[in-house]
Amino acid sequence: AAGIPVVAVDLPSGVDVHTGAADGPHVQPALTVTFGGLKPVHAFGACGRVELVDIGLDLPPSDLLALDAADVAARWPVPGPADDKYTQGVTGVMAGSATYPGAAILCTGAAVVATSGMVRYAGTAATEVVSHWPEVIATSGHATAGRVQAWVVGPGFGTGDTSAAALVFALGTDLPVIVDADALTILAAHPEIVEGRTAPTVLTPHAGEFARLAGSPPGPDRVASARRLADRFGVTVLLKGNVTVVAEPAGRAFLNVAGQSWAATAGSGDVLSGVIGALLAAGLPAGEAAAAAAFVHARAADLAARDPGPAPAPTSAAGILAHLRPALASIL
């Protein structure tokens, strides 16, 4: 009450250690100092600046993880002297429509920027996509798209029969698939189309889409909620938010703390989907591809908000896309 900065030891009193929720009186620290290892509260709770102190604990491996810049750099596909455009991963994108061509432009552009390989677009916004990204090979549908190594399906795609057929086609292949936006709505109505799928699959719902898929909102324990949905469908689930949760089926979960909400803007998810798709095409495991993409996406949003800076200001999905390359350069 005196306005003096407070330092919390281990975690702020009154804040739930698993969820970061505070249902009653609680400490709001300027700094939290914890020891040995981080806990979920340090990502989800209002902890101020968090400092981790090594006190020599021999802790067992955790299945709750967070990638840092070095982790992302170690995983990001960088072409070697023997690589060509095919060996780096060919990303297929089914997104956008006559109503929402911008979704196709954002999603496809993000896939172009994320790797140095090839991007193939299949859909009704082919003309608009090529006008923005002339390096993309565009066709009117998946039947003529050619060989790809992963599919991105859903942003701005619509939920009609043609869109549903495209999703069924993608999920019927043995390729990695990321399901986003309108494709999640289709999947919520027809969950059987993903049953028994063994190829890497990533769902990227926001809270409303999660509720349609799971039958209820995520609730305060976002990690447990994402894990339940991942186990139910047998896929990797990326639950969007200021703290993004990536849950693998019966496996690890990754947290990405954005530190800001500049990415909470229309079209931002289309950019994220394109990046994940490119990483899947390059061969990254589904959980690591989603976690690494979320990290770079958040950094690009922060850079966009600070351009020309240094004081941050609202940005847009196009701004985030424009700053993907600087974000990657700062990491790689």
Image (tube, helix red, strand yellow):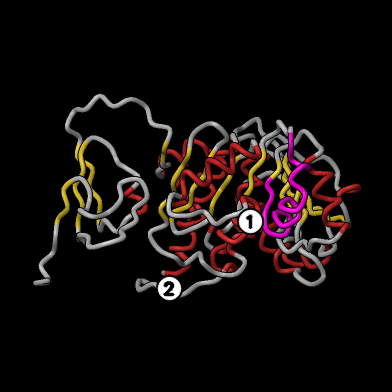
Q: Which residue is mark 1?
A: 110
From what the image shows, is residue 54 above or below residue 331? above
Q: Nearer the viewer, residue 294 or 167?
A: 167
Q: Is residue 326 visible?
A: no
Residue 20 position in % (x across, y down): 34, 53
Q: Nearer the viewer, residue 158 or 137?
A: 158
Mark drawn on residue 308:
2
From what the image shows, is residue 59 above or below residue 29? above
Residue 246 position in % (x across, y down): 52, 44
Decide: marks 1, 2 in contact (CB < 8 A)?
no
Residue 138 position in % (x across, y down): 83, 55
Q: Answer whether residue 186 is magenta in the image.
A: yes
The amino acid at mark 2 is Pro
Question: Horizontally, is 133 left or right of 313 in the view?
Answer: right
Q: Nearer the viewer, residue 162 or 191?
A: 191
For the magenta stretch, what is the residue range?
178-195
Q: Residue at x 74, y 45 (%)?
A: 191
Question: Horizontally, is 184 left or right of 293 in the view?
Answer: right
Residue 175, quarter of the rendered image: top right
Q: Residues within 10 Å of mark 1 (few under 14, many from 20)?
A: many
Q: Residue at x 70, y 54 (%)?
A: 184
